Structures are given as C-alpha cells and as structure tokens.
Amino acid sequence: MSLSFEPRLAKMFVIDGKEDVVPFVIRVKGLKSVKTRSVYFIAIDSSLSMDGAKIFFAKEAVIRMLKHLDQEDYISVYTFCGKVSKIVSMEKIKDSDKITKLVADIKLGGGTDIHRVLEYMYRDILLLVSRAEKNNGDEVPKDIKIILVTDGNPTTGVKNENKILDIAEKLGKYTSISLVLGIGDDYNEKLLMDIASKTKGFFEHLSDPSAIPTLVDKMVSKYRALSAKNTKIFIRPAPGVGVYIYNKPAYNVKGGVEVEVGDVYGDEIVNVVGEFIVPPQKPGPIFLASMATNYVDGNDKPIESEIATLTIPCLRTGISESLEIDDKVFKEVNIVRMASVLAKNLYGEISANKLNELVQELTNMTIDIDRRDLYSRTIDLKAQLEKEGLSPEVIKKFVALLSKILSGRYE
C-alpha cells in the first residue's frame, strides 16, 4: 500500500435518547513513494511595486531551487504585470544556465493581472496533458506544482474575485500542490488564501522578502516523491447519521459522502477533520459509518483500501456523569472548526481584543496537541498583536495561519 488512513473519534460514547455530535479526524499518511517527474509552474509579479528586494529575492528563489530539483524535472516561469510573459517555457532543469539567465533578465512593468497569469498556466497545463496523451511515448505529468509570488491587488484585466477563483479552481484540477506568497502589506490576503485553497496548497505572508528563497526551498525539498494521486475517502454513514467535513471538498454521492484529499507525498500526513451528527439512539453499540480510500499509486495502478468500520457505545442517561473524550482529537477538531468559521467571516466585526482571545485559544490548543509549527506561529502572532493591535500585518499573518490549518498539512 502507498498510504494508510486512520480515523479517530473524539468521543468515547454517546447518550441515548438525544441527538449528539461526534467529532473525528482522519489521518492520511503517505508510505511508499515514487519519485516522479515534477513540473513547476511559477508566476512572479513583475509590477513596478516589486522593485528592489522583492523582485531580487523572487528571482533568487527560482535560481536557487534549480539546485535542488532533479535534472529531468521541468520548469515554466511567467511574469505578470499589465501583461503576462512566459520567460521560461517547459525547460528541463539540466538547462539551468539558460534558465538562470532568463530569470535574471526579468523586467518590471505597470499593473497586476492575476487572472491572466492563472489563465496562461491553466492553458499551458491543458496543452501539456493533451500532447502527452496523444503521444504514447510521452509520460503524462503526474506531479504539477504551482508557485505564485505577488505583492499587490489585481489592478488590470479581470478584477472580479469570483472569476479569479473560478480559473484557480480549474487550475487546481491538475495541480498536486501550490505555494502562494504574499509580500508586504498591500495585497488581498483573503483572495490569495482562496487561490491557494483552490489549487490544493497554502498561502504564506512575508513582510521580509529575503525569506522567499527559504520558503520555496522548503516546498521543493518536502514535496518531492508522490505516494498517491487523486486520493479520495468514501464515507458511508449509518441511516440518519449526517457527515460534515470542515477542511476538504466533500460531495454527497450515491450511498454516502466523497471527500477529496488530493495528492499525498511520501511521509507526509494530511488531516481530514469533520463531525458525525448522530440522531437519538437506543442503548448499546451503534454503527456510525464505514470508510475506505481509493487512489492511484506511483505505478499508475488504481488502489482501494480495506474498509474501516466505526462504532461507538450508546449509554443510558445517567450512567456516566462526565463526558469521556480523546482530548487531543477533540482539540484538533476545534482548531480546524474555528479556522473554518473565521475564514468564512474574515472581515466581519472583530476587535483586537476578540482576536487576541481567539489567538490565545489557538495557542493553548496547539501546544496541547503538540503541533509545534502552529504553536510557534500563534505565539509570534500573539506577541505582534499585543504590540501593534489590529494592524494589516497582523491580519495577514492570521490569515496565513488559517490557511495552514485548513490545508490539513500542519504536521
């Protein structure tokens, strides 16, 4: 098997005669992995506001990543301002001298057209896949990664956010993972978070452009070898039991709910978080749901996992005075639930004091469940919030934290 999955319930039992909610986490882990040819599509904002350190370190990130990629990997690089230019067109990494020169020669211009650069990448990926399918000798790319670097809002071309997200969603159908970087304090963090979500990745905020190469290097080194493509979880609940998923696309299908996990890399864990809504039950053991995964392994072989069955005891009212829970799972579900609600209401009524309370709550829960990356982020955010109040920088860091949580890739 190329991956494993482990469903865990937060509650040890339910009480008879009343509706109950049973939170759960499904940990999907990449096991046996295969190094496949990676294809990187990189979009760099080349508007005038990127002048100086921003464009310098964006170029440096691309040039530096070439040293960490395999010689047979491919890269395409686009710049976007008022127009889109493809400066590197599907070059093999072994031609690094040529790629380096082309990237170093990037010039700046006026405007920012995010929609068009996403459209260009989508069009080129379709051509790439179509060409490979027609030529039997060519390998259809399995591992397509996207990196987007920008410091501004859309100012030219299509500015409607829904239309931008529509093209991002189309792009995401062919994408294994993405990294979306917002630089500085003059961009739309909600838009970038949503683009990252649609393209199966996460959004990061950087106030210091010199950190761009480090984040890109981290992505390149961490997501190298695929364990499973197009991973899905099928949940068949018991009659009357509802299923709600907080952090992954989920669809009602015949017989149950299908959850899109996406591509999973070697040794990584992707967490799917949700809840069962259980109608009133009679005392005794009750069947909640069955689950199974299906995916395509590194040898292009479709795989279906064994079925996991979830049951939970239903106790008579009054037998247990206290609620028995798996504290770690319960808090993990609460973190993701909170992030999901906040992401949908980012610009509602929220004060610095309220945000401070939320960040403190997240801080306590992340340390309790031993998520050190999330904990360090919340500690940093809390300190900055106390110092600056509800500044644009604080909001952007907060949105990046939500994006990381909702990606399920926080281990």
Image (cartoon, helix red, strand yellow):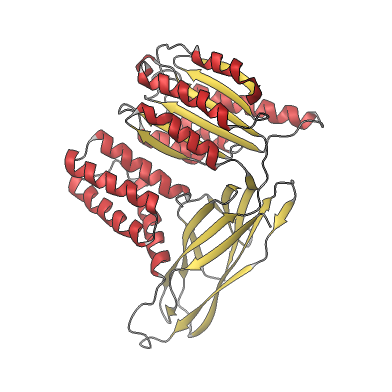
Quarter-wise, where is residue 321 in the image?
bottom left
Residue 407's place in the image compared with 48, above or below, is below
Expressed as whole percent of the image width and height from the top left, the position of residue 176 reads 58, 40
Pick the residue in front: 339 or 71.
71
Whether 85 is drawn above or below 175: the answer is above
Q: Please provide percent x and percent y for residue 49.
A: 35, 17
The answer to whether residue 357 is visible is: yes
Q: How many marks?
A: 0
Q: Is residue 350 visible?
A: no
- Looking at the figure, which quarter contains the N terminus? bottom right
In the displayed structure, does residue 153 sit left or right of residue 291? left
- Most foreground residue, 164 or 72: 72
Q: Position of residue 126 (x, y in %)?
A: 66, 29
Q: Residue at x 74, y 46 (%)?
A: 300
Q: Position of residue 3 (x, y in %)?
A: 63, 56
Q: Residue furthest right?
A: 136
Q: Is residue 118 left or right of residue 368?
A: right
Residue at image location 36% in from the left, 20% down from the top? 53
Q: Residue at x 67, y 35 (%)?
A: 37
Q: Is residue 264 left or right of residue 187?
A: right
Q: Where 64 sits versus 52, above or below?
A: below
Where residue 351 sits, quadrant-wise, is: top left
Q: Is residue 124 left or right of residue 112?
A: right
